[in-house]
Image (spheres, rainbow, N blue to C red):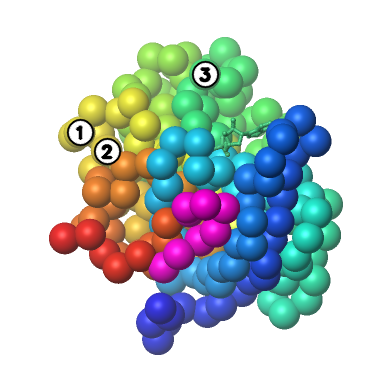
Amino acid sequence: MFGKNIIRMLELKRLHYQPATANTPILKGVNLQAGSGQPTLIAGASGSGKTTLVEVISGLSNPQKGVIYWKNKLIKARQRRCISGVVFQFPERYFLGLTIAQELRLGHRRLSGESQAAVLKTVGLSKVDLRKKPERLSGGQQRRLAIAVQLLRKPSILLLDEPTAGLDWSVRYEVLELLAELSKEQILIVVTHEPELFKNLLSSTYVLKEGKLWPMSKLS
Ligand SMILES: Nc1ncnc2c1ncn2[C@@H]1O[C@H](COP(=O)(O)OP(=O)(O)O)[C@@H](O)[C@H]1O
Ligand SMILES: [Mg+2]
């Protein structure tokens, strides 16, 4: 499953998770190894537990059973929150800034011009007018802005929940190119219920089914 340039860093072993408010477990023995180099793609039908898995990996929830290792050491939820950046589904619904510049500065009051320019370049938004409202950006640009906000936290693990949901076809390809690029720098975990969209993206691909992750060969 791992190519030459992929370094294993995150390991999930036998994770079981049942939210207090659920009658049955959602994750029932999830195993995963992920590294940087190429995206880790997790496919799964609606309701299969993809968002729940993102919450567990990023430390927003704690599994009842199983272990999570980071660079061969056990890592607690609080530490996972520190090293993770999560872009939830439809992140543009949660923009708070009156301008794009403000959106980037939320939580980064002393954001330097250099860091700002660098992150905008990474996500391909160098040319936008930062005084614009975030809502004035196109759908694809709004997703890029949401990713930029998380990149400013310099996460070691970037998790994207349904990054292409609700985007036009043309824009979806924009986002896919960005994903390939981003996975070179940090672990990138993408969950989706539309894996066929990602068929041209070189990735380690799994399917979440019956509470477990199964390796999936690329769709053709
Ligand atoms: N906090 C919760 N309490 C009760 N049920 C939940 C909770 N979170 C998720 N679920 C249920 O667990 C299943 C998986 O949810 P989710 O992780 O959102 O799936 P996906 O993202 O793959 O669509 C769904 O049936 C959902 O209703
Ligand atoms: Mg979901």
Residue drawn 76% across the image and 30% down it: 21
Magenta span dominant secondary structure: strand
Name the kind of residue labelled 2 in the image.
Arg
Q: Is residue 111 left or right of residue 219?
A: right
Name the kind of residue labelled 1 in the image.
Trp
Please state the horizontal and vertical placement of residue 192, each as a whole percent of the image. 41, 44
Circles 2 and 1 in contact, beta carbons < 8 Å: yes
Residue closest to the eye, 185 or 128 = 185
Name the kind of residue labelled 3 in the image.
Arg
Residue closest to the eye, 162 or 128 = 162
The answer to whether one can see residue 1 in this image is yes
Query: Relative to residue 16, is residue 4 depicted above or below?
Result: below
Q: Name the residue carrying label 1.
A: 169
Q: Name the residue carrying label 2.
A: 172
Q: Earlier in the sequence, mark 2 or mark 3?
A: 3
Rounded to the nearest whole Å, what is the CA distance between mark 2 and mark 3? 18 Å
Circles 2 and 3 in contact, beta carbons < 8 Å: no
Crowding near pointer 3: few (<14 within 10 Å), some, many (20+)? few
Q: Earlier in the sequence, mark 1 or mark 3?
A: 3
Q: Name the residue carrying label 3.
A: 93
Magenta-highlighted residues: 208-215
Label 3 sits on a secondary structure element that is: helix
Q: Is-magenta flag for residue 214?
A: yes
Rounded to the nearest whole Å, what is the CA distance between mark 2 and mark 1? 5 Å
Residue closest to the eye, 111 or 15 = 15
